[in-house]
């Protein structure tokens, strides 16, 4: 028998405190969904709480029917009274049980609710697995399941040092954790050694995530926040036939600054400092039919293809060597778009198979999984045909958009994906079409089980998703910004973390005109001597279905650094002086720039390989 009724928080003031905390970052929560929701269909906001998230979804997506679901009738009644839209409704329901018919939903959004399913059912983590299975059954083909919740750390022991008042609270927590259990089962063991607490990693994280909820301490101690590790989340999604499109721990900047920094120290058992635990976690899955893949496995030992070529350059100023990799034929990004009233929609490929990132599963940046399916612009290889003809053929093949549906074209940006190591210049083309296509690419267009889906995204919603880390591929975001600029449209407000710039000391700013007028430079000459920094690797990538069967495969070559990781840190230096905001750029020299433009100088954001 579940004990959900014990979630009732009493009077209106208690509800207000709870909902205020839940809704403070609602804009960012909803924006994150923009990268993964279609603009038509039925979305269930499971455990919708106040209903503000459901209301925000319905407001942002007028073509969606949004249904808020909560087991608490008080919550549902309050939401029905407060939030009213033609495409919004609320109902009482248990999110762990069938609330809708099979295959009836386009998307399901679980925001900080699945830990209630486990907590109020005897803390059984398998209840979360059962709830996910129920929800997957309610999704239609290619429906989306988005879970935003807490994530359990990997098993282990940690050491924690706290201020005296927090140490007293931890000692209290050690006897009250999992407060729905009888007294003899509650709490956890720990040891005090030289001023440090030694305890299990999960219970340490549970305390750090709730230590500031003093006003609702007893209620919060009914709940166990963490239930699955990131690896377990990914395994459950794959088992249920959900193709993982994103799996990202999140560090809320406000919580880090106000609740973590300077308030505790923690290390592993050997005394090595640990990073702050994630404050939240997001995983996104796409339900695929039997026979389609949910992930990739890389097998080494494939024969060379000769597709990628390495060349080498020497910087004649200092003798430093640079490696540069190239592939045949230029790449073109094509961004189709159309208008509906005052709204602007862009067309992109969703869940397009890109398995190469999965070949290197270690050294993850912020623990974000390297998934094998991406949202990206349509991409063409430029051969001997003119640019416009290449675009026409791509749109006809991939989107069933005929030449008569193309209204106009704008030349987009030229950009170098990685001019320090990749000899490639990408051009983009912005293509206005008459309306949304109703077409799913033929899977025979790729050697895998899918060629992805075509989906429409309202342009400013897409940008908001990028602002909160919801897009993996920067070129789609970049071209959407460029499209809005070409059409004289505003990109909308920034909803990422607030940028609070303090005035700095005197600056000697340079104008963009002066930087562009600087002298030309050619710093690189070819050489046969390698820098031994890059190497060409290859693997056979096997696409696996939910049962582990191989449903597609391809041998691919890729390039990787020999010594450093695959991760790059890019910095946007900002300064505020005399009421103006300045952006810092690096006046760099890069071999790919010289290969295409004849000169090596290029203004770039400062970046370092980690």
Image (cartoon, grey):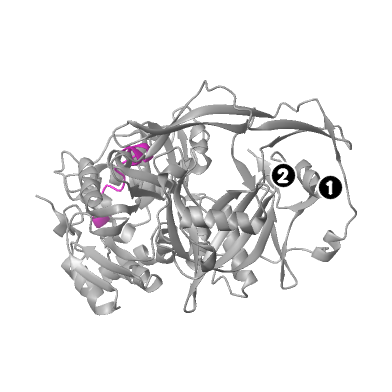
| Residue sitting at x 52%, y 57% | 395
Query: With respect to residue 366, does 78 lie above or below?
Result: below
Which is more N-terminal, label 1 or label 2?
2
Asked whether residue 515 appears in the rendered view, the answer is yes
Instruction: Give the quarter of the figure containing the C terminus.
Output: top right
Give whichever of 59, 229 is nearer the camera: 59
Please state if 438 lies on the left or on the right of 490 as rendered.
left
Range of the magenta residues? 219-235
Q: Residues within 10 Å of mark 1 (few under 14, many from 20)?
A: few
Secondary structure state at the residue bearing disc 1:
loop
| Residue tagged 1 | 598
Residue hosting label 2: 419
| Residue 68 vertical position relative to residue 452 in the rendered view, above or below | below
Nearest to the eye among marks 2 and 1: give it.
1
* Among the 4 quarters of the image, the one containing residue 105: bottom left
Let me know if residue 49 is in the magenta part.
Answer: no
Query: Toward the viewer: 597 or 421?
Result: 597
**Quadrant of the rendered image containing residue 421:** top right
Is disc 2 surrounded by few (<14), some (14 to 19) or many (20+) residues within 10 Å?
A: many
Q: Considering the numbered disc 2 on the image, is that residue within a helix, a strand or a loop?
A: loop
């Amino acid at each position: 028998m579940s004990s959900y009724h014990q979630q009732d928080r009493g009077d209106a003031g208690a509800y207000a405190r709870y909902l205020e905390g839940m809704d403070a970052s609602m804009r960012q929560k909803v924006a994150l969904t923009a990268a993964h929701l279609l603009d038509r269909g039925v979305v269930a906001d499971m455990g919708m709480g106040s209903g503000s998230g459901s209301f925000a979804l319905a407001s942002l997506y007028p073509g969606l029917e949004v249904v808020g679901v909560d087991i608490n009738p008080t919550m549902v009644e309050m939401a029905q009274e407060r939030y009213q839209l033609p495409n919004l409704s609320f109902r009482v329901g248990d999110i762990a049980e069938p609330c809708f018919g099979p295959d009836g939903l386009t998307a399901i959004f679980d925001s900080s609710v699945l830990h209630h399913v486990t907590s109020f059912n005897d803390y059984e983590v398998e209840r979360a697995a059962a709830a996910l299975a129920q929800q997957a059954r309610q999704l239609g083909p290619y429906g989306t399941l988005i879970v935003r919740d807490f994530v359990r750390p990997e098993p282990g022991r940690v050491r924690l040092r706290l201020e005296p008042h927090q140490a007293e609270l931890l000692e209290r927590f050690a006897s009250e954790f999992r407060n729905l259990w009888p007294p003899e089962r509650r709490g956890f063991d720990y040891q005090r050694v030289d001023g440090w607490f030694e305890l299990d990693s999960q219970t340490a994280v549970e305390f750090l995530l709730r230590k500031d909820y003093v006003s609702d301490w007893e209620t919060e101690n009914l709940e166990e926040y963490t239930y699955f590790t990131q690896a377990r989340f990914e395994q459950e999604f794959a088992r249920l036939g959900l193709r993982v499109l994103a799996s990202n721990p999140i560090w809320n900047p406000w919580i880090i600054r106000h609740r973590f920094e300077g308030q505790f120290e923690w290390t592993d058992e050997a005394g090595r400092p640990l990073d702050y635990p994630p404050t939240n976690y997001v995983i996104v899955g796409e339900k695929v039919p039997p026979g389609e893949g949910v992930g990739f496995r890389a097998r080494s030992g494939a024969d060379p293809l000769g597709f990628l070529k390495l060349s080498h350059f020497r910087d004649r100023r200092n003798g430093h060597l640079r490696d540069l990799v190239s592939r045949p034929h230029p790449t073109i990004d094509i961004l189709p778009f159309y208008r509906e009233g005052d709204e602007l929609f862009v067309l992109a490929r969703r869940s397009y198979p890109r398995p190469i990132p999965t070949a290197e599963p270690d050294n993850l940046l912020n623990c974000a999984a390297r998934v094998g399916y991406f949202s990206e612009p349509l991409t063409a290889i430029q051969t001997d045909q003119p640019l416009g003809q290449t675009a026409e053929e791509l749109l006809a093949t991939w989107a069933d958009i005929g030449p008569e549906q193309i209204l106009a074209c704008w030349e987009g940006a030229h950009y170098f994906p990685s001019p320090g190591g990749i000899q490639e210049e990408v051009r983009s083309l912005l293509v206005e079409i008459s309306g949304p296509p109703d077409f799913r690419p033929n899977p025979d267009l790729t050697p895998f089980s899918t060629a992805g889906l075509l989906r429409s995204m309202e342009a400013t919603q897409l940008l908001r998703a990028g602002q909160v880390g919801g897009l993996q591929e920067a070129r789609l975001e970049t071209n959407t910004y460029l499209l809005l600029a070409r059409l004289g449209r505003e990109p909308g407000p920034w909803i990422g973390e607030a940028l609070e710039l303090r005035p700095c000391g005197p600056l000697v700013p340079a104008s963009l005109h002066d930087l562009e007028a600087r002298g030309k430079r050619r710093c690189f000459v070819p050489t046969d001597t390698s820098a031994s920094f890059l190497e060409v690797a290859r693997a056979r990538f096997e696409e696996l279905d939910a049962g582990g069967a191989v449903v597609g495969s391809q041998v691919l070559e890729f390039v990787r650094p020999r010594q450093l990781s695959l991760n790059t840190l890019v910095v946007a230096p900002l300064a505020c002086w005399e009421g103006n905001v300045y952006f810092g750029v690096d006046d760099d020299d890069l071999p790919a720039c010289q290969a295409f433009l004849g000169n090596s100088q290029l203004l770039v954001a400062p970046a370092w390989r980690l």
